[in-house]
Image (cartoon, helix red, strand yellow):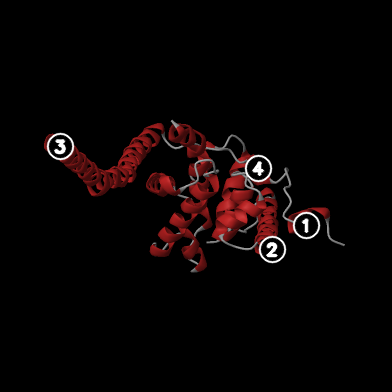
Amino acid sequence: MTPPEELQASLGMHDHDEPTHHLQTHDVDPLVGERIRRRVTAVLRQEQRRVARPRSAWISLWYHRALEPTLLIGLGASYLVWAVQGTLAILH
Amino acid sequence: VAFEALYARLRAPLYSFLVRLSGRAELAEDLLQETWLRFARHSHRLEPEGDPRPWLFTVARNLYRSHRRWALLDGERLRELGLWSGAEVAGPFEALCASESERRLEHALLELSLGEREVLLLCGSAGFEPAEAATILGISAEAFRQRLARARGKLRERLAAAERPTRGTRLT
């Protein structure tokens, strides 16, 4: 017959008397920990800037390829309509 | 702010995991730094609401595995080659142990194979559920259960052997 411990283990169940549960958690040297924190924070900032850059590039592309031509064409068309209407008003 | 909190919460568990996996404090510090740097580089791809713990432990474990592939003669290989002196086995945490039983446990862990240490540390001190730990190791739940049972058995054997009076079991 399978002993209960082995049965538990074979089922992958947690045995809270397992010795490794009682292992102490030790921290890294505070100076090393701080050095790592600073480096990682710097890399995080770089990454955030890098990820944000394509968005601004896309906005710029959208402005120059779509918004700016639309505005120019709209203004030109408005001016043309105004000019034609003004000319017709003078002639009549 | 999210990173600061995460770093404060997971720095020590990750470091402990790496030290017990590698048996070397200096190497664990390097791997800890590389793990967090990878996190920083991939943070925009991680789910903001997801738990980054399994991801971090997976990266830490893979980094150590890669390092080990490049290291020609680590302790385990020396032992396999019969060049390991048992007297030299001393984990970095052994000096910090409050009791003799803790010291024996740290020592016994280092004597297990890497695969066995991994399952015990992930399910034990790191506190992962077996399914999560199996995902971290990239193995099936069934394979994980078998490895865990085997590792627990071996650890108990080593601890029992360590508690017995020394009777010439040391490898020389």
Task: In the displayed orientation, state which residue is furthest to the bottom.
Answer: B81
The extreme right residue here reads: A1
Q: Quadrant of residue B53?
A: top right
* Badge 1 or badge 3: first in the primary sequence: 1
Mark 1 touching mark 2, by CB under 8 A?
A: no
Circles 4 and 3 on the same subunit: yes
* Of marks 2 and 4, the one in the foreground: 2
Residue at the location (67% across, 60% down)? B141
Question: Residue B20's spot in the image, x, y percent?
Answer: 52, 48
Tell whether label 3 touches label 1 (CB within 8 Å): no
**Disc 3 sits on a residue from what chain?**
A
Mark 4: few/some/many CA within 10 Å (<14, 14-19, 20+)? some
Q: Indicate the position of residue B104 as horizontal and vertical percent values.
A: 61, 46
Disc 2 from disc 3: Cα separation? 94 Å
Q: Are marks 2 and 4 in contact (CB under 8 Å)?
A: no
Query: Disc 2 and disc 4: Cα gap in Å?
Result: 22 Å
Is B41 left, or right, of B113 in this rendering?
left
Residue holding disc 2? B142
Real-space Cα separation, disc 4 to disc 3, in angstroms = 98 Å
Q: Secondary structure at mark 1?
A: helix
Q: Residue at x 52, y 46 (%)?
A: B17
Task: Residue at 62% x, 44% y: name it.
Answer: B127
Which label was assigned to residue A6? 1
Q: Amino acid at mark 4?
A: His
The disc at residue A21 is 4
Kindly identify the amino acid type of the residue bearing the numbered disc 3. Answer: His
Q: Secondary structure at mark 2?
A: helix
Q: Pointer 3: what residue?
A: A92
Q: Is residue B166 above or below residue B73?
A: above
| Tags 2 and 4 both on a single chain | no
